[in-house]
Image (tube, rainbow, N blue to C red):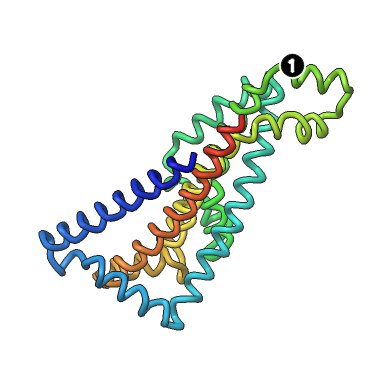
Amino acid sequence: MTEHKPRAWRNALAVLAALVVGWQILHAVVGEVALRSPWETVAYTAKLFASRDFWPNFDETMTAFAAALAIAVATGLAIGMLLGFSRLAGEVFEPVLVALYSIPKVTLYPIVLLAFGLGMQAKIAFGAIHGIIPIALFTINAVRNVRPILIKTGRVMKLTTWEMVWQVLFPAAIPEIFTGLRIGFSLTLIGTLLGEMFASQRGLGYMLMNGIGLHNVDVIMSVTFMLVVFAAVISSALLAIDRVLHGRA
């Protein structure tokens, strides 16, 4: 175990170094018109952090993303637990969820705008739409894979449905459920940013689209860099927790 951790850190640093070198090479090939070097991007990002105009957009995105993720997790877990525990409901509605998941979410955005209008509500709804179904599908499979002896034991103890879910199903299925939460995190972030890019006057997605419209390569590179770093750090932490949970299962 002690040897594994230094090896993992070395691998991560090697991958990071390779990405930076590749980025620098690509910048040398493409040029300043379409790309900035890693060092220029980091410098402009620091300058952006010092700007007062940046933080309201950052707060807007994080607020919308946090709300969308909370809705996606709560709704996805509820649907997954219900359909996973009830075989009949699962057989009827799981194909519907799979069919909905296959629909390109961008096509639903006009409906979201009509229902919620422009602003925070539409971004939250669009972000949640991306995260609910994968969390629900992973939860369904996780509940179905719970050992039958645990469910029989709960029934022998005459647990209520809520007690069965909270005391038996959820603890036993948490490793697989957490994998769904990890994927739901990434998709919810993508959905929130897409919502800001299509119809919003604030947020990091709006800054990105505005930079594209004005061909401001510095803003495009800096915002993209921040989003990649944020997603990579959180996803790495969630992946580490996921591995621990699966190791204990």
Q: In the image as oriented, which residue stretches furthest toward the right?
A: 158
Q: Residue at x 30, y 49 (%)?
A: 15
User: In the shown orientation, is residue 82 left or right of residue 55?
Assistant: right
Instruction: Report the residue marked by disc 1.
Output: 149
Q: Number of labelled discs?
A: 1
Residue 23 falls left or right of residue 127: left
10 Å crowding of disc 1: few (<14), some (14-19), many (20+): few
Residue 27, image quadrant = bottom left
Query: Residue 86 location in percent, x, y?
Result: 71, 23
Which residue is pictured at 42% across the width and 82% down the height?
51
In depth, the one of 213 and 150 nearer the eye is: 150
Question: Which residue is at a point 25% across and 66% down the rendered structure image?
Answer: 38
Q: Position of residue 168 (x, y in %)?
A: 76, 29
Q: Can you say whether 37 is above or below 138 in the image?
A: below
Asked whether residue 40 is in view, the answer is yes
In this rendering, position of residue 41 left or right of residue 198 = left
Relative to 235, does residue 213 appear above or below in the rendering? below
The answer to whether any part of residue 136 appears in the image is no
Q: Residue at x 62, y 40 (%)?
A: 76
Element type at marker 1? helix
Identify the residue at the far left of this view.
Answer: 29
Question: Taking 193 as reference, is 161 left or right?
Answer: right
The one of 116 and 143 positioned closer to us in this rendering: 143
Q: Amino acid at mark 1?
A: Ile
Q: Position of residue 162 (x, y in %)?
A: 81, 34
Position of the C terminus, as image quadrant, is top right
Picture quadrant where residue 208 is located = bottom left
Q: Position of residue 60 (x, y in %)?
A: 53, 68
Residue at the extreme front: 2
